[in-house]
Image: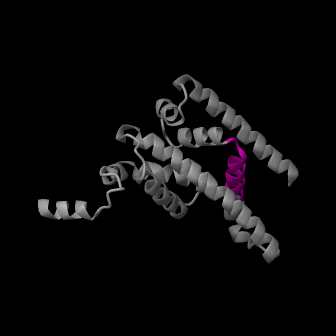
Amino acid sequence: MKQLLTEREDAVPASVRADLEHIFRAAYPKVVGVAARVLGSRDEAEDVAQETFLAFGRTNVPAGEAIGWLCVAAAHTALNHLRSGRRRAVREEAAGGAGDAVAPDVADAVVTREEHRRVRAALSRLPRKQAVALVLRHSGLSYAEVAAALDLSPGSVGTTVRRAESALREELNRGQSSE
């Protein structure tokens, strides 16, 4: 068994962190959760998590700070995916035109999906620090963990999150009035 581990370790390029597998196993569910909260799709969240861990594997972030770094990176990457997805959707709508009627039996699902889309679009328009703080806090990270991840004082996390929630409501209201 020891020989197998040694051979496997030899197969890992020197540029990849030795502790990556341990950190991956410990942090993967939380990283996927943060990304899923932003994106609303587990499949897309897993793609974001993969990108995030690939980037992490090339860093020198201490293992004790890994979870914060990974959660912030996942939130940033997911927000970037949201923004690029919104631009793609606008291009696809313009190219494809509108017109398909929605069957009444799926109306509730469409309304819910549309509401989630509106919230994600509004979230992507928030200042990045506010959006990340909001996502991290609502993903279950404690004030201390959010503070460490965003280099804030623990006392300012609550204020940042409240401001982010207020800004999100404003964005949602602005989106409704323009529709």
13 in magenta: no
Q: Nearer the viewer, residue 19 or 146?
A: 19
Q: Nearer the viewer, residue 96 or 150?
A: 150
- The quadrant in which the C terminus is found is bottom right
- The quadrant in which the N terminus is found is bottom left
Percent across and percent down for residue 73 are 52, 48
Q: Is residue 115 visible?
A: yes
Q: As drawn, is 14 to the left or to the right of 73?
A: left
Q: Nearer the viewer, residue 1 or 40?
A: 1
Q: Work out which residue is located at the far right of the displayed protein and give it.
A: 178
Magenta stretch, residue numbers: 113-127
Task: Kindly identify the residue that appears in the image at 44 percent across and 48 percent down.
Answer: 30
Q: Is residue 162 above or below residue 96?
A: above
Q: How is the image coloured?
A: one colour
Q: As drawn, is 116 to the left or to the right of 51?
A: right
Percent across and percent down for residue 120 are 67, 52
Q: Quadrant of residue 9?
A: bottom left
Percent across and percent down for residue 90 are 77, 65
Q: Is residue 58 above or below residue 149?
A: below
Examine the residues drawn in magenta and state their main secondary structure: helix
Task: Kindly identify the residue that appears in the image at 16 percent across and 64 percent down.
Answer: 4
Q: Is residue 43 above or below residue 37?
A: below
Q: Work out which residue is located at the far top of the displayed protein and give it.
A: 155
Q: Is residue 1 visible?
A: no
Q: As drawn, is 167 to the left or to the right of 43?
A: right
Percent across and percent down for residue 52 are 48, 54
Task: Kindly identify the residue that appears in the image at 36 percent across and 55 percent down.
Answer: 16
Q: As drawn, is 76 to the left or to the right of 170?
A: left
Q: Is residue 102 above or below residue 54?
A: below
Task: Kindly identify the residue that appears in the image at 58 percent across and 54 percent down.
Answer: 78
Q: Quadrant of residue 168?
A: top right
Q: Work out which residue is located at the far front of the displayed protein and give it.
A: 14
